[in-house]
Image: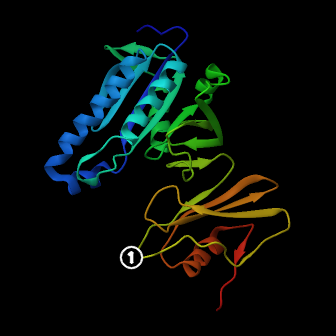
Amino acid sequence: MGESRGGLTFVFTDIEGSTRLVTELASSYGLALRIHRQMLKNAFDDFGGRQIGSEGDGLFCYFPSPGQAVEASVAAQQKIEHYDWPEDLRLRVRMGIHHGPVRMSGGEYVGLTVHEVSRICSAAHGGQILCSAAVARALGDATDDVRLLDLGAFSLRGIPEARTLYQVCASGLEDTFPPPRDAVRDGGTRVTIWRREPPRRGTAIPESLPIVSPDDVEVEIAAASSGISGSFRVVVRRRGVVEEEYDGLTVGGVADAATVVNAHSTLIRIETTD
């Protein structure tokens, strides 16, 4: 096995909600999948990208440089976002970009870098491009059309240390997303609550909760990292540092949020009317 000196830049893509789309589109899904792959291939080819694998509806590619990978990903997202999809479809693709050392084994790239780019992609939402600190450092001040938004450090599943994630922002792309999926903010604890009943129509994220907390604690209510519309998370910061997160609070609104948070939190309490 030989190591690639200086490392390579990889892009991993995945269609958001592909299982649901297969059910909804039936035989039309195959056409949508082929159109999306051709748009990705064209955009990646334009910037020197090379496809080295595919899994389900995802693609795995490498590029000569982080800058080319970022520009290619932006171009691909712009094409997908503004394509006139059939049957009122809005196909959404999540993308992850990472640069690092790899090895060749049996004709395939292997190493932590490959696993990291997969996890970074998994943390993204449909329509979002996330990249690592290694890509951000190589990109510098980015370009006139691209900027990087520092989202903070997150623990990614299976990765030994927290990684800082950056959102790639560009004209024509959505720039407001919930917190990263399948990730826990560094230094924090997240409790995920499973739904136990069908979603209620018109369920909205609460603007506030009756919370009692010390003066040095701040509480934020935000959209859940993933899940059904109306699900939300409670983020607890002490002196600016995230120490607790309760993600996916949906079932019974304030009552169920109080049950979960009050059972686990050492910093806050949600008051109830009992």
Residue at x-position 54% and y-position 51%: 177
User: In the figure, residue 213 lies in which quadrant?
Assistant: bottom right
Can residue 255 be seen here? yes
User: In the figure, residue 256 lies in which quadrant?
Assistant: bottom right
Q: Is residue 124 above or below residue 148?
A: below
Q: Is residue 123 above or below residue 51?
A: below
Question: Helix, strand or loop at disc 1?
Answer: loop
Residue receiving disc 1:
197
Residue at x-position 38% and y-position 22%: 44
Residue 36 in the image: x percent, y percent?
29, 36
Name the amino acid, label 1. Glu
* Residue at the bottom extreme of this rendering: 274
Color style of the picture: rainbow
- Residue sitting nearer the eye, 42 or 244: 42
User: In the figure, residue 236 lies in which quadrant?
Assistant: bottom right
Can residue 158 be seen here? no
* Residue at the right extreme of this rendering: 215
- Residue sitting nearer the eye, 136 or 40: 40
Residue 130 in the image: x percent, y percent?
53, 37
Quadrant showing the N terminus: top left
Residue 27 in the image: x percent, y percent?
13, 48
